[in-house]
Image: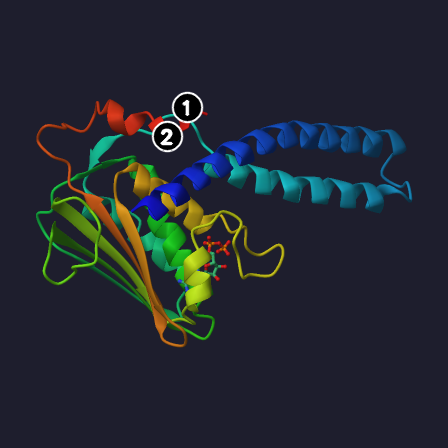
């Protein structure tokens, strides 16, 4: 448990650092983009240096895209904490997921009925599930199947003795693919910001770091079951909203206290 806490604090510190850098960097990029546009205009469209200026502009734009991802990762402002119907939220983006992963991937979404809500930001949840689906898609270049399952879980449960969450009711969201899988070394580092095995320019390494951030902020837990050559299942366990916590005004959840002492 202590190891987990330390990892979480390290991630939070990295988030604050990354956010600060991204913010200053964005200002610098705005100057580069603006000045490049001015020079391009001064020189006129036929000038032989236009392709060079276009390269400057394109690179600055790529960097700006990366910093905007970073800013999402480092986001400090309180998220909304609503009582969210997980099944409705996931069903709501089912079509988007299907379109995003493409037709050569079988997609199945299995959801239980009558689940209690979970306290978090609905769009964060949608982003998380979409992120996991995109990762799954990237791991299945030769086709395969993606299954999203949503089911209730009562902790402690005999079937899952190793889960470290406090006792209570949870919603279990499993995102399972039949892709490449991940070696233990990759699983160990997967939640770290900027950790990626993808070629430069294709992965930011921020996807699972963002997922981890959303889940832990909702007091949830996340695990990865993966077998190289067989596939990967990412399990999210989100605590059900309790009666004492109506969902719309939960200061403990909206103020990320871990950031307060920095
Ligand atoms: P990115 O996708 O930009 O690389 P992530 O943080 O989302 O960043 O993922 C980190 C790494 O974890 C990926 O580069 C990949 O090696 C591995 N990974 C994540 N999801 C899966 C998956 N479903 N199957 C196989 N490997 C995965």
Q: Is residue 64 left or right of residue 223?
A: right
Residue 226, image quadrant: bottom left
Residue 151, image quadrant: bottom left
Q: Marks 1 and 2, how far apart in space?
A: 7 Å
Residue indicated by mark 1: 261
Q: Is residue 229 left or right of residue 93?
A: right
Judged from the image, the secondary structure of the residue bearing numbered disc 2 is helix
Residue 100 is at least partly visible in this image: no
Q: Which residue is at 32% across, 54% downward?
A: 95
Residue 26 on image: x %, y % = 63, 31
Residue 223 on image: x %, y % = 30, 56
Q: Which residue is at 65% across, 27% downward?
A: 27
Residue indicated by mark 2: 258
Packing grade of label 2 (10 A; few <14, some 14-19, many >=20) is few
Asked if marks 1 and 2 touch (Cβ < 8 Å), the reply is yes
Return the residue nearer the eye: 205 or 41. Answer: 205
Above/below status of 161 relative to 88: below
Above/below status of 189 relative to 64: below
Residue 178, image quadrant: bottom left
Q: Is residue 155 left or right of residue 216?
A: left
Above/below status of 44 relative to 205: above
Return the residue nearer the eye: 258 or 124. Answer: 258
Return the residue nearer the eye: 203 or 58. Answer: 203
Residue 74: which numbered mark, if any? none
Judged from the image, the secondary structure of the residue bearing numbered disc 1 is loop
Above/below status of 125 relative to 202: above
């Amino acid at each position: 448990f202590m190891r987990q806490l330390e990892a979480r604090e390290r991630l939070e510190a990295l988030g604050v650092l990354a956010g600060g850098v991204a913010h200053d960097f964005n200002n610098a990029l705005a100057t580069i983009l603006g000045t490049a546009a001015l020079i391009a205009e001064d020189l006129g469209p036929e000038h032989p240096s236009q392709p060079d200026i276009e390269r400057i502009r394109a690179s600055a734009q790529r960097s700006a895209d990366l910093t905007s991802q970073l800013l999402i990762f480092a986001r400090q402002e309180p998220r909304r904490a609503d009582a969210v119907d997980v099944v409705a939220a996931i069903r709501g983006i089912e079509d988007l997921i299907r379109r995003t992963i493409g037709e050569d991937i079988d997609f199945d979404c299995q959801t239980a009925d009558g689940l209690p809500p979970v306290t978090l930001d609905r769009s964060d949840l949608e982003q998380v599930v979409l992120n996991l689906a995109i990762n799954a898609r990237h791991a299945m270049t030769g086709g395969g199947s993606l299954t999203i399952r949503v089911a209730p879980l009562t902790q402690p449960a005999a079937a899952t003795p190793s889960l470290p969450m406090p006792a209570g009711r949870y919603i279990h969201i499993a995102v399972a693919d039949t892709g490449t899988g991940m070696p233990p070394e990759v699983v160990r580092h997967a939640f770290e910001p900027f950790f990626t095995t993808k070629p430069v320019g294709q992965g930011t390494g921020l996807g699972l770091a963002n997922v981890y951030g959303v889940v832990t902020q909702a007091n949830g837990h996340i695990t990865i079951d993966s077998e190289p050559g067989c596939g990967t299942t990412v399990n999210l366990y989100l605590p059900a909203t309790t009666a004492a916590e109506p969902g719309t005004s939960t200061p403990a959840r909206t103020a990320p206290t871990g950031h307060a002492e920095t």
